[in-house]
Image (cartoon, coloured by chain):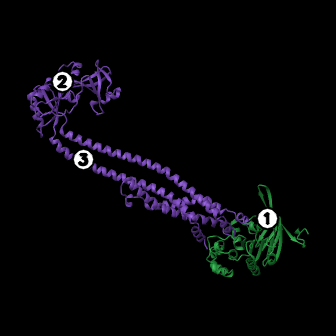
Chain colours: A green, B purple
Amino acid sequence: MLEFKNVSKWFNGTQGKVTALKGVSFSVRPGELLAMRGPSGCGKTTLLLTAGGLLRPSDGQISLDGQDPYALSPEMRSRLRGRTIGFVFQQFHLIPYLTVRQNIMTGSLAIPQKEASVKAQQLISRFGLDDRADHVPAKLSTGERQRTALARALLNEPKVILADEPTGNLDEDNAQTVFGYLGQYVSDGGCVLLVTHDARAAAHATRSLQMSRGRLVEQIDDTGEYFERGKK
Amino acid sequence: MTIWNLLIREILHRKLNFALAVLSVMVASGTLIGSVTLLRIYDINTRKLLEQKQAELEKRMAQLQDDTRKAMLKLGFNVVILPKDQNLSDWYAEDYASKYMPEEYVHKLADSGIVTVRHFLPSLQQKIEWPEQKRKIILVGARGEVPNLHKSLVKPLVQPVPPGTISLGYELHRSLGIKVGDTVELMGRKFTVHACHEERGNKDDITAWIYLAEAQELLDKPAQINAILALECLCIGDEGLPIIRKEIANILPGTQVIERGSRVIARAEARTKVEEQAKIAIQKEIIAREDLRVVRERLASILTPVIVTACAVWIAVLGFTNVRTRREEIGILRAIGVRSRKIMVMFVSRHILLGVLGGALGFVAGVLAAVYFGSAHEAAQIRMIDMDLPWTGLILASVGGAAALAVIAGWIPTIVAARQDPADVLRNDN
């Protein structure tokens, strides 16, 4: 469903070239929740935005639902994104003047659908937001906000959910709830790329990868020492 | 969910930003419409004022014609007494007599007991070359009025020229640069300038008046005159002139009498003069109001673009503020697949909406303010129906123009919003 082939991304800043991703290769298949772990600044968010068609890689190739999003025009890429991807962020990014229901339905701005309101109501019920449906984000708890963001991501029935630290602002109970919903989505055939530094994520992931300084590494022993993948 | 829903909810959420932008458009539109309406009100008032003055003039002229006719029936007329041998064709051609008669004639007339004449004015007139200035002039010697001793004394109609002084017609003093109090030399004799007359548009403009005795000396006509002007002759009816002629012929057989200017001419001249003055006053009013209109138009043509530009800048600033405030919102919308074209449509629609609202409010405010201040300033009640303005066109221009202004002013912020890179917002999230 989502495949990275030797993807690199660097930025030319005032202090020279900064490499955020370096030769990253991996794939996420339907029914898989891939946890991409690593410390802050290791390139996790860059990887997620690159996967979401929002940040063109400097090198390498990405395949999303069998298409290279960066080979498409910006308008077609937006369409692919709306149809294929659901985003969940640590800061929720809910629109402050819209109610829970309206926030969930913003997905229909990208892919107009007749049954958007029915679907939104189903998601509201599924995520336990019935009594909060007409409240604006400022009136919600952080857990409710994240559930609203998750429901919004699911409105267009995406094939992939890209989640960036979705539990970063949540307490244990709410984090477990979010992981539960993501697990259910994977069970239903969806796939999730979860970037996080939360060690709890590994318990819910079908597979975990570790990132360090823009590279993928994997843990091979109990000492906690990381080695670059393919160089064992 | 549609872009329209999103737009309305955003406006309701950020009321102040939207209200300030609407206010800016309203000010711009109101200024423009107010200027047009004010100028229109000014034109209407000018038309009304001139119509009123014209009506007053016509009424006054009708009244004057009647009054003058009645007054002239009772007023006297003027005659000139000339030497009997004076050829009248020459007199009419030259406007002064070439023959002379004794100055004592005037005393004889004044002492005669004649009652039909009130004022006697002897004069000696001759066209001469002013040797010192090398130009032809008419020299008039006059001594003032000789009182009719058999009638009660009345105020003299003509003021005399004192001895040793000279009065000059307009063309003479203007072309020679002479002022009252200057000393001029005429035929070897020095005179102090007693008066410099205003332009009369006749031979008086090239005439110099001196005391009669001095004129007789200069022209070598001692105790001679060539005309006696008899003023305010009081004979009522068409038989007046023959009666006076007969009376004067009895007293002064060596003379002839002719009327100087008929009553009809005098009446017509009086009327014409009043009419001309009234027309000049109206013309001056027209010019003054036209000048004021030009000033107002110029002021409006400077002030209006300045205000419209300032409002456009303010709308753009508010647009940038709105885009900046909505940076995260735009980023997430773009991330979930909303195309940049839709973002653009949302912002353009917002500007059209605020333009239409501001334009409509500005139109109403501009017209009402113009009517209020215009009426107060012009001290006249203006009714909308009197204005005869193309209201439909003005409303469309106001609303359409305001919408265009808002879209143009908000275009750059709109482009910035549509081109905003969602990755920038989302990457800075962590």
A62 relative to B38 in the view: left or right: right
Of residues B2 and B95, the one nearer the viewer is B2
Q: From the top left corner, tell me how far across and down residue B407 is, in percent.
A: 57, 60
- Give the residue pinned by disc 3: B61
Q: For the point 41% across and 49% down, which residue is it?
A: B293
Q: At numbered mark 2, what does the secondary structure look like: helix, strand or loop?
A: strand
Q: Which residue is mark 1?
A: A41
Q: Amino acid at mark 3?
A: Met
Query: Badge 1, how many Cα within 10 Å: few under 14, some, many 20+?
Result: some
Tell me the distance, in whole angstroms, between the alpha carbons under discs 1 and 3: 99 Å
Residue type at the position of mark 1: Gly
| Residue at the disc numbered 2 | B225
Residue A24 found in image quarter:
bottom right
Q: Nearer the viewer, mark 2 or mark 1?
A: 1
- As helix, strand or loop, the secondary structure at mark 3 comes to helix
The answer to whether any part of residue B170 appears in the image is yes
Q: Chain of mark 3?
A: B
